[in-house]
Image: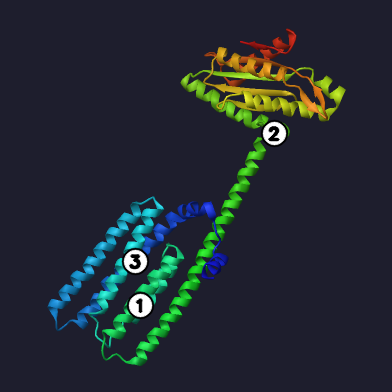
Amino acid sequence: MIKRFFSEILIDLGELEGDYRVFYLKNDIAQTVLSLIIAIISILAMLRVDTILFKDRPELFMWVVVYRGGFVLATILVVLAIRKTTKVKVYDRLVFAWIVLMILFFVLFNFTRPANYLTTVYEIIIPFSIYVLSPLKVKYNIALALSFTAAMMGVDYFFKAGTDPMILNTTATAQIIVHTLGLGSALQIQSYRRKSFKAYMLEKDAKEMVAYLANIDPLTKSLTRRHFFNIAESEFLRYSRYRRPLSILILDADDFKNINDTYGHHAGDIVLRSFSLVALEQKRAQDTFGRLGGEEFGLLLPETNLEQARIVAERIQKTWDQTPSNMDSEMIHSTVSIGGAEAAHNDKSLEDVLRRADRMLYKAKERGKNQVAME
């Protein structure tokens, strides 16, 4: 029942749970560091109260100073460790360890307080802070906050003789209210953070999908002309800088107009889609395939010399020659002519390579089509 209650309030992020924690890690670290600094200042400020409580016992006051100093030193070390961490698990362990240390510190310190001096302020602030400021899971924060309250109230009830029962009852009532408000606030904060993260991820996925669709030709599922040339320009710049082999193929479906005139434009679309699928299957993982326009396609082959490019081109040409397209049980046979060129030292731009590849394409057409010509 309790688990179902929490699941209704807190969105289950499933596999995104780890990403959610990493997403907020920097903010959580900054908030935790600030909280610990405030805790250090508060602990040091309480020394003034200690001078009043232990003014007649200087030796005990010195032990109190050492006790507080030890806690402050431990907190400073935790702050330094948290600021350096980049892992969620390490961060959670440091926070959990510090909260446990803080609980022990205040519980042991409560034994030194006289019966008429209840640490009510801290008994209210600390549980509420655990709920609201701790980045740990809600169930851990509940356990830590309740442990602190139970330990502090146990000291007040069983070890401070002479305490007014009315004050104890009022303190207990205040604790119930604090835990209720603290848990309610924690659930609201966690719910808001989770909803914000999920909305961010949905928006990010939507933007990535839009970017993907903008770069993909809707008919052939190959890259658009603009995206293909953007990648090609980047590869040519890399070639110019490092002089690594780079080849480009231009592929053009033979007699495509006849297919449209004979079978209709729908058949032409099927042929283009089928050819693109064949080319995508035959190309290598590092190659880039895109539609340049109409029935013309480009294939960018990085780290590839002319002879290696010829092997890829002939594999595509022969495979497509043996792969008729199926339209309503009617097989449409089509071929492709391919021209290719390798980037040379005297090429000033990508256009120089493309121009030579295009010239080879027309040479393949002039030789009778359904073949590969390279330069």
Find residue 315 and report its horizontal and vertical position in percent: 63, 17
Tell me the distance, in whole angstroms, between the alpha carbons under discs 3 and 1: 15 Å
Q: Name the residue under label 2.
A: 217
Can you say which quadrant of the picture contains the C terminus? top right
The residue mark sitting in front, 2 or 3, is: 3
Q: Does residue 321 appear left or right of residue 94 in this picture?
A: right
* Sooner in the amino-acid sequence: mark 2 or mark 3: 3
Number of numbered discs on residues? 3
Badge number at residue 99: 3
Q: Which residue is rendered at x = 68% and y = 16% of the image?
A: 318
Q: Camera-side residue: 2 or 109?
A: 2
Find residue 325 and report its horizontal and vertical position in percent: 77, 25
Q: Name the residue under label 1.
A: 150
Query: Are the residues flagged by discs 3 and 1 in contact, CB closer than 8 Å?
Result: no
Tell me the distance, in whole angstroms, between the alpha carbons under discs 2 and 1: 65 Å
Q: Does residue 254 appear left or right of residue 131 in this picture?
A: right
